[in-house]
Image: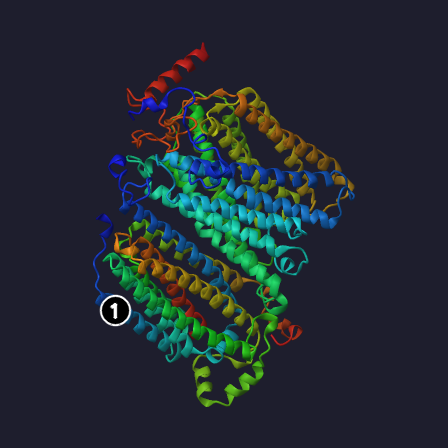
């Protein structure tokens, strides 16, 4: 079989066929994503551990100090970006290279929106002093007093069974984890944007008009993972 | 030829998945914030997130036609995430309370946090 | 299997070593065999470096009082020794060198699945090693290789570059795992089903799975600790509501499975060596393969036994203690099957076989003391004493290095096409074996007497045993130098080995020594089970070799 394929260089010589090579590439990517999942798992563990220790503080901060509107909008933005990546993969399978590039640009656009929203969230937190560890300079007691004066918020707090007397212990830890988790996720968004940008450039050069959709598919898988992590981060940080 | 063994889903199908994901995002928000779910508060959010994750992995990432080994790999990773969280939280939950940094007797000694 | 022309006896004119001899042809090679040799040179260097630090430690401990260094230097030297040996030698050693070289040969592939990635992992490893060594050179660290917070986040020494080095080496390890797992899944030769995989391939596969699943967690830990050391976010700082035990949990979630990253490939080597030199089909192939995966899996459930005295819950400690013993069950399965493979075999006592026997001895002794340490009440007495040091040196140094040396001696003729002197090889192996015992048996006794680890001074009562231990270390160092000389002499003027000097049935021997650039001249078809010494189809090359072996065996008996 090696003789038959020696002339055509649509795959590396140690594979039998292009399909064989693609199967290997997909498997390698899945294994890489398994490693990414475990990378985030450590941070999730840390979050759940400290949430277990400082339950009321963590829930209070998620309810009062995090902006659920921004979190939810960002969830929608990332879901939409996943959708456009799927369409890019679809276009690559149909060998429509320009379309691939356009869908990837749309994805990068959504990723940009995500980061802009994140930027507003971060600047707000930094401005308020809602920062990790020793950098935490926010007056929690004032925040609690403000909430106590707001009957709508108080009814939410009461519904959620948050004991305001326990709030305080562990507040800087919440923001340590908030910044670590969203920061590591944000780095992945940036890497993903770079990757998709590179793919878009290749797409506009017409590289995917030939039978070569593997790079798009793999970058797409990476981008979906970024979305996947956020699907867990969103309820964990903003809702629970 | 053999690389295209995937089922040919159309744009409409993927849009349907996107809509489902949007609806589930709303459901997770509503159940977490505006419903009395008691002890199911956290498990429910985890279950909904997992359903969303399944939709993304199975259809968007095409795991449905990527072969059984890949499915096994991904499931394995989830198993180890669960293992890590369970055994570490299990330690904190069953530890001598004074060994935990949130032990209330230390509250005064530590200051504002 | 009709390519007997390729297997001309003797030294092939063209092989992977002489296809391009420039520096560039090596530095940019994507040939798995050349990358393996680059790994070999690098890990031998890191092993030398770590060994020198070990000798310095032993020289310091020759006398009860301060000797050649002060307390702070001692802390740095034992940290250097640990970090170099664990991250830069043991983790990449067997997979990087022999996994790389043998895995494609054993499954009849032309290369690993991602050859460019393979080269990249080598350079990432070197980059990480340079990071670490730079940090170690410029101030070093005094935390030990475990980097426990909050000490590691407050010490003035250079933890950040060393942690980033460990992170980078970890990345290399993950990508190697991804590469090897994909290779085993997708590049097996026609006829090579999962049930026919050589046991070394199973071992590399189990190792790769652990690398992919566990290593990202240490990557995260190193980043978190580095961030803590740099900025003081308080994640592991009790004064800020953090829990140092979280760091230990996450650290050992990787670092305990990591000891199986070290030992599993060594176990795979021993399976191959014992089958080859007993001339017997492995006993309990399925059990050996299954227990490899069993150890890889169970290795993830046991990390808490490092935290018995750290303030972990007693409930968790009990659970982890019981689970730890499961590793003993799987290891015992392996040991019994190895012994039964030798039973009634025609044992050919060559150098690799002696190392395999050494491995068996060290894994039984080291493993049994490990079971004892898994008992919480006993561990409280032995924790942080030389008993623990001796235990993990028996397993990690004794067993892993024995496995590494067995592999080196077993596959040396395949890799270089030359044969070393078996007599001198055996002599060197004896030095190493005796050296290990003289070094570490006194440390078991010292630990049991209560000598704590990581101190540069000790009371007078411990003197005799410490002197013995240092003498053993000297013997050990001499043994390694001896091996190096024997092998270098063999490289220069060794006899031509021929394609299969051990008359092994392993698939990797079906090609020339050294192998061709593309491994095989024709895609091999795997018909026999691996290590099939009893049922050999007639007319095959294997049958000729079996006849030859038989004739030789008969000759020896006369």
Rendering coords of residue C486 (x, y %):
57, 25
Taking depth in this image into account, of C142 and B51 the one nearest to the observer is C142
Q: Position of residue A24 (x, y in %)?
A: 33, 47
Q: Is residue C24 visible?
A: yes
Left or right of A143 in this view: C100 = left
Chain containing mark 1: B
In this orientation, which residue lies closer to the viewer: C34 or C498?
A: C34
Where is the N terminus of chain C found, in terms of image quarters?
top left
In the depicted view, which residue is nearer to us: A199 or A107?
A199
Q: Is residue C449 above or below residue C540?
A: below
Identify which residue is drawn at 44% across, 64% down: A190
Asked whether residue C198 appears in the rendered view, the answer is no
- Secondary element under disc 1, as helix, strand or loop, is helix
Q: Residue furthest top?
A: C558
Residue identifier under label 1: B15
User: Which quadrant of the view contains residue B63?
Assistant: bottom left
Label 1 neighbour load within 10 Å: few <14, some 14-19, many 20+: some
Task: Give residue C94's position: percent from left, percent from top.
Answer: 49, 38
Quadrant where the C terminus of chain C is found in the figure:
top left
Disc tally is 1
Above or below: residue C32 compared with residue B4 = above
């Amino acid at each position: 079989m090696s003789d038959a394929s020696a002339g055509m260089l649509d795959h590396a010589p140690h594979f039998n066929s292009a399909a064989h090579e693609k199967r290997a590439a997909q498997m390698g990517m899945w294994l890489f994503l398994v490693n990414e999942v475990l990378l985030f798992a450590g941070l999730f563990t840390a979050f759940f551990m400290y949430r277990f220790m400082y339950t009321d503080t963590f829930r209070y901060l998620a309810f009062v100090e995090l902006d659920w509107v921004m979190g939810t909008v960002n969830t929608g933005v990332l879901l939409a970006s996943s959708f456009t990546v799927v369409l890019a993969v679809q276009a690559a399978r149909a060998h429509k290279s320009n379309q691939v590039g356009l869908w990837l640009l749309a994805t990068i656009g959504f990723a940009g929106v995500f980061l802009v929203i994140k930027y507003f969230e971060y600047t707000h937190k930094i401005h308020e002093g809602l920062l990790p560890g020793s950098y935490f300079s926010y007056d929690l007691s004032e925040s609690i007093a403000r909430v106590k004066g707001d009957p709508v918020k108080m009814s939410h707090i009461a519904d959620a069974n948050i004991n305001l007397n326990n709030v305080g212990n562990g507040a800087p830890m919440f923001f340590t984890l908030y910044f670590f988790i969203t920061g590591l996720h944000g780095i992945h968004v940036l890497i993903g944007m770079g990757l998709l940008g590179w793919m878009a450039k290749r797409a506009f050069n017409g590289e995917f008009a030939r039978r070569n959709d593997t790079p798009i598919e793999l970058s797409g898988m990476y981008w979906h993972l970024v979305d996947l992590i956020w699907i867990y981060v969103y309820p964990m940080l903003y809702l629970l | 030829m053999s690389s295209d063994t995937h089922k040919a889903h159309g744009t409409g199908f993927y849009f349907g998945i996107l809509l489902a994901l949007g609806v589930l995002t709303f459901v997770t928000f509503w159940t977490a914030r505006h419903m009395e779910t008691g002890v199911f508060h956290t498990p429910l959010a985890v279950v909904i997130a997992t359903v969303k994750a399944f939709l993304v992995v199975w259809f968007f990432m095409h795991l449905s036609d990527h072969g059984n080994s890949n499915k096994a790999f991904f499931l394995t990773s989830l198993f180890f995430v669960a293992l890590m969280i369970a055994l570490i939280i299990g330690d904190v939950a069953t530890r001598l309370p004074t060994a935990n940094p949130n032990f209330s007797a230390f509250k005064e000694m530590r200051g504002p946090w | 299997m009709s390519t007997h022309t390729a297997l001309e006896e003797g030294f092939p004119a063209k092989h992977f070593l002489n296809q391009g001899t420039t520096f560039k042809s090596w530095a940019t090679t994507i040939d798995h065999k050349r990358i393996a040799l680059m790994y070999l040179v690098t890990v031998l260097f890191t092993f030398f470096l770590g060994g020198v630090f070990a000798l310095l430690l032993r020289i310091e401990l020759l006398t009860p009082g301060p000797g050649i260094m002060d307390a702070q230097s001692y802390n740095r030297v034992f940290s250097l020794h640990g970090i170099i040996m664990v991250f830069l030698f043991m983790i990449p050693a067997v997979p990087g060198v022999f996994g790389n070289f043998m895995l494609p040969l054993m499954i009849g592939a032309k290369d690993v699945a991602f050859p460019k990635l393979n080269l990249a992992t080598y350079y990432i490893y070197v980059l990480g090693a340079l990071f670490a060594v730079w940090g170690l050179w410029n101030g070093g660290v005094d935390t030990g290789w475990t980097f426990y917070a909050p000490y590691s986040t407050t010490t003035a020494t250079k933890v950040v570059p060393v942690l980033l080095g460990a992170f980078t080496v970890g990345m290399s390890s993950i990508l190697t795992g991804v590469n090897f797992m994909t290779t085993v899944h997708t590049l097996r030769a026609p006829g090579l089903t999962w049930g026919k995989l050589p046991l070394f391939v199973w071992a590399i596969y189990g190792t790769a799975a652990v690398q992919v699943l566990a290593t990202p967690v240490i990557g995260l830990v190193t980043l978190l600790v580095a961030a803590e050391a740099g900025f003081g976010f308080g994640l592991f700082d009790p004064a800020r509501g953090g829990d140092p035990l979280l760091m230990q949990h996450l650290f050992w979630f990787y670092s305990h499975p990591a000891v199986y990253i070290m030992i599993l490939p060594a176990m795979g080597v021993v399976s191959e060596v014992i089958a080859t030199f007993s001339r017997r089909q492995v006993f309990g192939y399925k059990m050996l393969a299954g227990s490899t995966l069993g150890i890889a899996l169970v290795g993830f459930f046991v990390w808490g036994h490092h935290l018995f005295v750290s303030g972990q819950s007693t409930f968790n400690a009990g659970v982890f203690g019981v689970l730890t013993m499961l590793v003993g069950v799987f290891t015992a399965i392996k040991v019994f099957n190895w012994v039964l493979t030798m039973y009634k075999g025609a044992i050919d006592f060559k150098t690799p076989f002696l190392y395999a026997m050494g491995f068996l001895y060290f894994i039984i002794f080291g493993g049994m003391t490990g079971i004892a340490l898994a008992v919480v009440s006993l561990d409280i007495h032995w924790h942080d004493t030389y008993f623990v040091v001796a235990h993990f040196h028996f397993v990690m140094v004794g067993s892993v290095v024995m496995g590494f040396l067995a592999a080196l001696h077993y596959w040396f003729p395949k890799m270089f096409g030359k044969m070393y002197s078996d007599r001198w090889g055996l002599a060197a192996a004896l030095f190493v074996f005796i050296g290990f015992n003289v070094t570490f048996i006194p440390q078991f006794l010292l630990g049991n007497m209560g000598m704590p680890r990581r101190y540069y001074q000790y009371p007078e009562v411990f003197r005799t045993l410490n002197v013995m231990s240092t003498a053993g270390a000297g013997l050990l160092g001499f043994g390694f130098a001896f091996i190096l000389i024997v092998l270098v002499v063999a490289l220069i003027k060794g006899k031509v080995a021929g394609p299969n000097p051990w008359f092994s049935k392993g698939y990797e021997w079906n090609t020339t020594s050294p192998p061709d650039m593309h491994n095989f001249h024709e895609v091999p078809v795997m018909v026999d089970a691996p290590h099939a010494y009893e049922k050999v189809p007639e007319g095959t090359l294997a049958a000729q070799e079996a006849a030859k072996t038989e004739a030789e065996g008969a000759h020896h008996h006369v």
